[in-house]
Image (cartoon, rainbow, N blue to C red):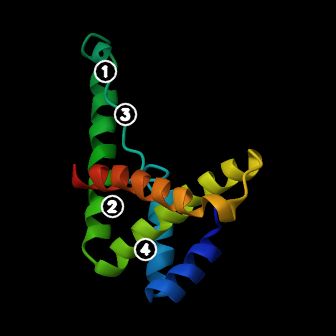
């Protein structure tokens, strides 16, 4: 994955988003309640928690974490700049995985550039779906 410096530099240059906003969004995504918030979401609670003695405590912690995730996503959605930085962060991460995979397979990135971008856009639909929920 590209470093936060790369995220900040590219988002500022190509999207006109301030470095402070990019830094804030990067920290929420990578260091927040859930790593890669937006691409990942909290797992579902296992059904057995209803019969386990400590299940109530685990449920409370789960729902508290879920509330924190929702709060972080709402905070991102309050600003157009933050939304741009959010999608750009995920787009760069996804593209870097795809590019690394192509290089490991010995593919020439210039020849498959269109497919790399199409695949990245396809994966970003999942981020949008997670954000909508």
Residue at which label 4 appears: 85
Residue 21 visible in the snapshot? yes
Residue at which label 3 appears: 43
Residue at which label 2 appears: 72
> Could you give the CA–CA distance between mark 3 and mark 1, rounded to whole angstroms?
15 Å
Residue drawn at (32%, 36%), measured in percent from left and top?
A: 62
For label 4, the SS is helix
In the displayed structure, 120 sits above or below 5; it is above
For label 3, the SS is loop
> Of callouts 3 and 1, which one flags the residue occurring earlier in the amino acid sequence?
3
Contact? badges 1 and 2 (CB < 8 Å) = no
Q: Is 133 on the left or on the right of 93, as rendered?
A: left
In the picture, residue 65 is in which quadrant? top left
> Could you give the CA–CA distance between mark 3 and mark 2, rounded to whole angstroms?
17 Å
Mark 4 vs mark 3: in front: 4
> Could you give the CA–CA distance between mark 4 and mark 3, rounded to whole angstroms?
25 Å
Q: Closest to the observer: 70 or 61?
A: 70
> Could you give the CA–CA distance between mark 1 and mark 2, rounded to whole angstroms?
26 Å
């Amino acid at each position: 994955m590209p470093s936060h410096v790369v995220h900040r530099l590219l988002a500022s240059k190509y999207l006109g988003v301030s470095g402070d906003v990019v830094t804030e969004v990067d920290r929420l995504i990578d260091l927040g309640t859930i790593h890669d918030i937006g691409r990942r979401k909290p797992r579902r609670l296992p059904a057995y928690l209803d019969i386990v003695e400590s299940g109530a405590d685990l449920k409370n912690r789960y729902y508290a974490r879920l509330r924190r995730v929702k709060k972080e996503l709402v905070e991102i959605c309050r600003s157009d700049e933050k939304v741009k930085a959010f999608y750009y962060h995920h787009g760069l991460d996804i593209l870097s995985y795809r590019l690394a995979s192509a290089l490991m397979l010995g593919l020439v990135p210039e020849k498959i550039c269109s497919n790399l971008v199409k695949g990245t856009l396809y994966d970003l639909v999942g981020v949008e779906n997670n954000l909508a929920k």
